[in-house]
Image (tube, rainbow, N blue to C red):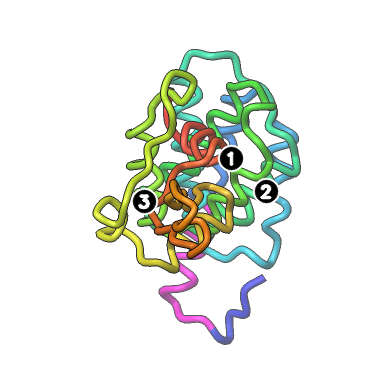
Amino acid sequence: MLNTDRVSDEELVQTAKAAAELEPAVEAFAEATGALEPVREATGWLGDTIRYRREAHLAKVLMKAAEKVKASGLPAHAVRDKWLRVVVEDGSMEDDERMQERWATLLANAATDNEAKIRLAYPRILAELEPKEALLLDRLWEKTPNPAEEPFETVGSETTSDLVDLAGLYNLERLGLLKWIWSTATTWDELSNGEVTLKGVQLTQLGWEFVKACKSS
């Protein structure tokens, strides 16, 4: 509960407003997926740890997800409790609208797609991405829209440097979403001297599938 002795009137107003927004959002998503009780129970995890800003963010994500489920026309099903809990805990922290859109799409896809395709790791990965890192993944995904028909394209700094720095690339590599591509030695001299250079980065299969899971069909 909020300590009313230490919050301003404005905070109290915002808290009440967020709580009012969250309830219909929960109902909308629960109705869209046909899983009233699991979704209602999931919101109980909010407890005292999620305050009005997180509730407002979660309301946006749930409302958008409900709209996407209905618009898809696909049969919906309940989302696994532990999957939904990650969304409640981490998705509610996101204040960037484009990232909220990704959360909503991922949640809608989890409710309408084969569960095996929407891995539990995906919301955890999304929670660890900066908005610009997510934009870079989209850019790499667009370069290889169908890896079953063509190999992943290797891109250099001219494709990545305007969005992320080296630390961002390392984060994406840490998450298993991209890999470094090095030139290979073609002569004995190059092999013995260790003459290999960094050619660029490449989306991994996991990275490609993750981006697809965050896109509307």
Question: Magenta segment, principal secondary structure?
Answer: helix
Q: Which residue is mark 2?
A: 43
What is the span of residues highlighted in magenta in the rendered image?
A: 7-20
What residue do we see at 70% from left, 61% from top? 47
Q: Earlier in the sequence, mark 2 or mark 3?
A: 2
The amino acid type found where label 1 is placed reads Val
Q: Quadrant of residue 46?
A: bottom right
Q: Quadrant of the C terminus?
A: top left
Does residue 6 sit above or below 192 in this rendering? below
The amino acid type found where label 2 is placed reads Thr
Q: Which residue is mark 1?
A: 26
Query: Badge 2, how many Cα within 10 Å: few under 14, some, many 20+?
Result: some
Element marked by disc 2: helix
Q: Is residue 61 left or right of residue 162?
A: right
Q: Are marks 1 and 2 in contact (CB under 8 Å)?
A: yes
Q: Which mark is residue 97?
A: 3
Q: CA distance from mark 1 to mark 2?
A: 8 Å
- Tell us which disc is closer to us: 1 or 3: 3
Does residue 71 sit above or below 94 in this rendering? above
Q: Are marks 1 and 3 in contact (CB under 8 Å)?
A: no
Q: Earlier in the sequence, mark 1 or mark 3?
A: 1
Does residue 114 sit above or below 161 in this rendering? above
Give yes or no for residue 16 being in the magenta stretch: yes
Q: Nearer the viewer, residue 207 or 40?
A: 207
Q: Nearer the viewer, residue 4 or 39?
A: 39
